Image (spheres, rainbow, N blue to C red):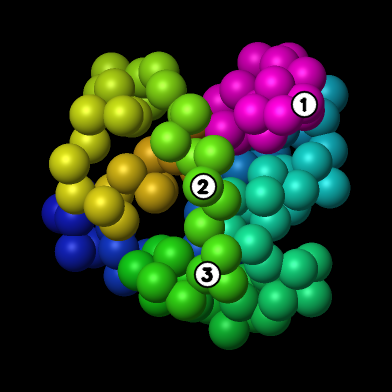
Amino acid sequence: MTRHRIYSMSVASVYPHYVTKAEKKGRTKAEVDEIIRWLTGHSQASLEDELAKKTSFEDFFAQAPQMNPARSLITGTVCGVRVEEVEEPLMRKIRYLDKLIDELAKGRPMEKILRA
């Protein structure tokens, strides 16, 4: 899949997969939402609005109210790629989100996922 195609995909098209991945491991949709809100600065209402509008990943991150400055503390691999070494800024943001959802599914405590 090309980068452009990933960027133009709606967050809403991937969101159910995030929730399913979390729920299969005993975590919740509320925790997935908390992670997304922490990363992007969205409120629950604005997150739900973006999902309803089927906003693309490109626009979702470009229009995020406040990307969390602690996101630079997110390290590790997703699909064999070190998140902190992804050079393209938008792809790095997408990988940050993927990594946080992976950590949730692996049972990591929320305080650690949210770099508290």
Q: Closer to the N terminus: mark 1 or mark 3? A: 3
Q: Residue furthest bottom?
A: 53
Q: Is residue 4 above or below residue 77?
A: below
- Magenta stretch holds residue 112: yes
Question: Which of labels 2 and 1 is toward the front?
Answer: 2
Tell me what residue is drawn at x 35 percent, y 69 percent. 58
The residue singled out by tag 3 in the image is 64
Query: Element type at marker 3?
Result: loop
- Residue type, mark 2 in image: Pro
Judge by depth and name the residue closer to the eye, 48 or 13: 48
Q: Is residue 37 visible?
A: yes
Distance between the alpha carbons at the discs numbered 3 and 2: 13 Å
Q: Amino acid at mark 1?
A: Glu
Estimate how packed mark 1 is, as few (under 14), some (14 to 19) or many (20 or more) residues with alpha carbons within 10 Å: few
Dot 2 or dot 1: first in sequence order is: 2
What's the amino acid at mark 3?
Answer: Ala
Q: Are marks 1 and 3 in contact (CB under 8 Å)?
A: no
Q: Residue at x 56, y 51 (%)?
A: 68
Placement of the C terminus among the 4 image quadrants: top right
Residue on which the image places disc 2: 69
Label 1 SS: helix
> Can you give x and y, in whole percent of width and height, for residue 10 in the image?
45, 68
Question: Which region shows up in magenta?
Answer: 100-116
Q: Which mark is residue 111?
A: 1
Can residue 25 be seen in this snapshot? no
Pick the residue in front: 73 or 10: 73
The x and y percentages for residue 25 are 75, 21
